[in-house]
Image (cartoon, rainbow, N blue to C red):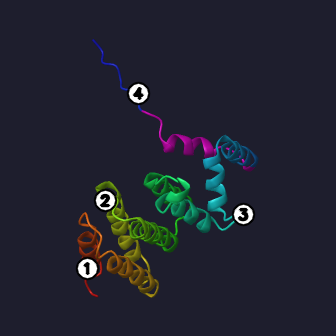
Amino acid sequence: MARKKKQQEPSWKDIEKIVDQHGKSQLIDLIRDLYRLSSDNKDFFFTRFSIGENPLSKYKKIIQDSVHPYLEDNEPLDIEKAIDAINRYSRAVDNPLEEAELRVFFVECGNNFTLSYGDIDEDFYDAMLEMYEHASETVLELPETEQEKFKKRLQEIMKSASGIGWGYYDGLCDIYYETFSKD
């Protein structure tokens, strides 16, 4: 009995072959269709091409509202929304300097939130530590001339967290001194 060949899933290479066969006007039509398909796609294009308001400030506002909400106004804490904003920005714009800015800003917002409202919970601090680590790694990707301002901000986050529980302060110290061992 003959075995059935397993059908291969379509991949980017399949799409790329088809796109290569299209002319400019067909590609513009395709991009227009993608633009109209969803608000996420619109945001992607606006961010990629820096159209409209400063894309970085838009994403910083999302992070601020999500990681340091105003509890007095019953605004919810939404770490995943802030992380998603950073990921969407990173996919749209390949700029480690701006990615470092968003990641450090995320941790600054979370740190300020806990300084304003008191200890949160383990999941919150785990998310802060994970982003602090990503921020530190991103800073290392930058030219040395750009690293110093971020290292100072990361150090300030670490110092200001000295009274925060859940192992947060110790985790920040570990990450900072492992990442920037020359300091």
The residues colored magenta run: 9-24
Choose the circle earlier in sequence order: 1 or 4. Answer: 4
Gap in angstroms between the C-alphas marked 1 and 2: 18 Å
Q: Amino acid at mark 2?
A: Asp
Q: Amino acid at mark 4?
A: Gln
The N terminus, quarter of image: top left
Q: Which residue is mark 2?
A: 126
Task: Count neighbours of disc 2 (C-alpha within 10 A) and say few if under 14, some if 14 to 19, many if 20 or more.
Answer: some
Q: Which residue is mark 3?
A: 52
Q: Amino acid at mark 3?
A: Gly
Q: Which residue is mark 1?
A: 177
Task: Count neighbours of disc 3 (C-alpha within 10 A) and say few if under 14, some if 14 to 19, many if 20 or more.
Answer: few
Query: Would residue 159 appear left or right of 94 to someone viewing this image?
Result: left
Task: Count neighbours of disc 1 (C-alpha within 10 A) and say few if under 14, some if 14 to 19, many if 20 or more.
Answer: few
Gap in angstroms between the C-alphas marked 3 and 1: 40 Å
Residue 22 vs 50, above or below: the answer is above
Q: Residue 127, position in %: x, y? A: 35, 59
Task: Name the secondary structure under disc 2.
Answer: helix
Task: Name the secondary structure under disc 4.
Answer: loop
Choose the circle earlier in sequence order: 3 or 4. Answer: 4
Instruction: Look at 60% across and 41% down and name the residue there.
Output: 18
Gap in angstroms between the C-alphas marked 2 and 3: 35 Å
Residue placed furthest toward the top: 1
Choose the circle earlier in sequence order: 3 or 1. Answer: 3
Task: Name the secondary structure under disc 3.
Answer: loop
Gap in angstroms between the C-alphas marked 2 and 4: 41 Å
Gap in angstroms between the C-alphas marked 1 and 4: 50 Å
Q: Main secondary structure of the magenta part?
A: helix
Instruction: Look at 43% across and 33% down and name the residue there.
Output: 9
Number of the front mark, 2 or 3: 2
Q: Which residue is mark 4?
A: 7
In this rendered view, identify the residue nearer to me: 20 or 76: 76
